[in-house]
């Protein structure tokens, strides 16, 4: 792994690491990666059709121990991101209509307006050279857009 880290840019994302490993070791469209003790073992899938087959499967795959450890306490057991099985299906069924392409297109101009306000606030902070909570501004932007689409 040290060799991989030396040959990958410092700011590279995890996808880049996976592709570098695949290329370096002449691996196929999917491979098993075990980085013990740094991370849990994982299957890396790099072929779009194979990834779509798994992501769009009718089978609900378990989210895994990291989701249970970190996201479930924050979002709750029945949140779509952290739920499994029946709870996931119920959450997904409620969420899907709002994310249909035709529904989202109706909200583009409002989302652009929200983003313009967000950018204006960033410019104001930059002009004043003050320290501020970017997380707070991003959370407000996300909340505004999501609630607009859902409601």
Image (cartoon, rainbow, N blue to C red):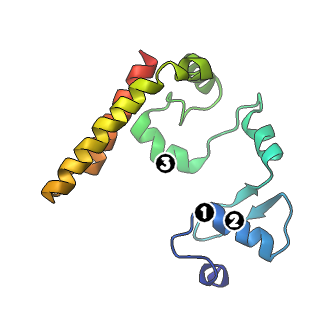
Eye-nearest disc, 1 or 3: 1
Q: Please tell me which residue is depicted at 58% across the width and 16% down the height of the picture.
A: 97
Q: Earlier in the sequence, mark 1 or mark 3?
A: 1
The number of discs equals 3
Name the residue beneath numbered marker 2.
18
Q: Nearer the viewer, residue 107 or 37?
A: 107
Q: Is residue 92 above or below residue 36?
A: above
Q: Choose top left, top right, bottom left or bottom right for residue 45.
A: bottom right
Q: Please tell me which residue is depicted at 77% across the width and 62% down the height of the picture.
A: 32
**Residue 46 on image: x %, y %:** 77, 55
C-alpha distance separating marks 1 and 2: 6 Å
Q: Please tell me which residue is depicted at 30% across the width and 47% down the height of the picture.
A: 135
Q: Is residue 122 above or below residue 33?
A: above
**Residue 151 on image: x %, y %:** 41, 15
Q: Which mark is residue 69?
A: 3
Look at the numbered discs 1 and 2 and tell me whether their residues touch, using CB distance below 8 Å. Answer: yes
């Amino acid at each position: 792994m040290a060799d991989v880290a030396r040959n990958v840019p410092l700011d590279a994302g995890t996808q880049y690491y996976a592709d570098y490993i695949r290329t370096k070791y002449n691996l196929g469209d999917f491979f098993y990666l075990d980085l013990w003790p740094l991370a849990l073992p994982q299957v890396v899938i790099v072929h779009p059709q194979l990834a779509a087959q798994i992501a769009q499967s009718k089978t609900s795959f378990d989210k895994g121990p990291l989701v249970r450890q970190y996201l479930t306490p924050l979002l709750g057991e029945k949140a779509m991101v952290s739920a499994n099985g029946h709870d996931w299906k119920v959450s997904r069924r409620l969420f899907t209509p709002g994310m249909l392409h035709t529904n989202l297109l109706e909200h583009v101009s409002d989302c652009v307006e929200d983003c313009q306000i967000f950018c204006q606030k960033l410019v104001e902070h930059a002009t004043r050279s003050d320290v501020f909570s970017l997380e707070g501004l991003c959370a407000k932007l996300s909340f505004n857009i999501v609630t607009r689409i859902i409601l």
